[in-house]
Amino acid sequence: MRQDFAKAIKWYRLAAGQGDVGSMINLDVLYAKELTDLIGQEEADEWLLMAAKQGSTLAQSKVGARYI
């Protein structure tokens, strides 16, 4: 398969909406790749915070790093 960020975001949103922490973090990673036309900073932040609240230490670390 070739890369298709729009499809990746579609599937990550679906999984994240069902509580998958890895998908929540991956949505933030896609935003970091500057795909701002596909996912905005506010949405990426919301998914990352949800992952952090569910106990993901990776997400908690990423949230903390944003405050530096």
Image: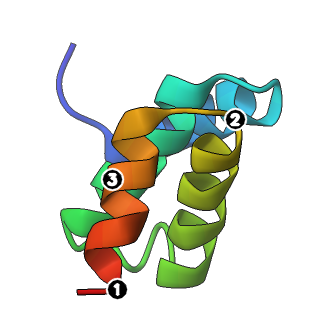
Question: Would you call the spot at circle 1 few (<14 residues within 10 Å), some (14-19), or many (20 or more)?
Answer: few
From the image, tell me which residue sits under label 3: 61
Instruction: Tell me the kind of residue under disc 1.
Output: Tyr
Nearest to N terminus: mark 3 or mark 2: 2
* Alpha-carbon span between mark 2 and mark 1: 19 Å
Q: Secondary structure at mark 2?
A: loop
Residue 53 point in image, percent of width and height: 69, 47
Tell me: residue 1, above or below residue 62: above
* Alpha-carbon span between mark 3 and mark 2: 13 Å
- Residue pictured at 52% horizontal, 65% vertical: 44
Q: Secondary structure at mark 1?
A: loop
- Residue pictured at 37% horizontal, 79% vertical: 36
Asked whether residue 6 appears in the rendered view, the answer is no
From the image, tell me which residue sits under label 1: 67
Question: How is the structure coloured here?
Answer: rainbow
Question: Would you call the spot at circle 3 few (<14 residues within 10 Å), some (14-19), or many (20 or more)?
Answer: few
Q: Is residue 29 left or right of residue 46?
A: left
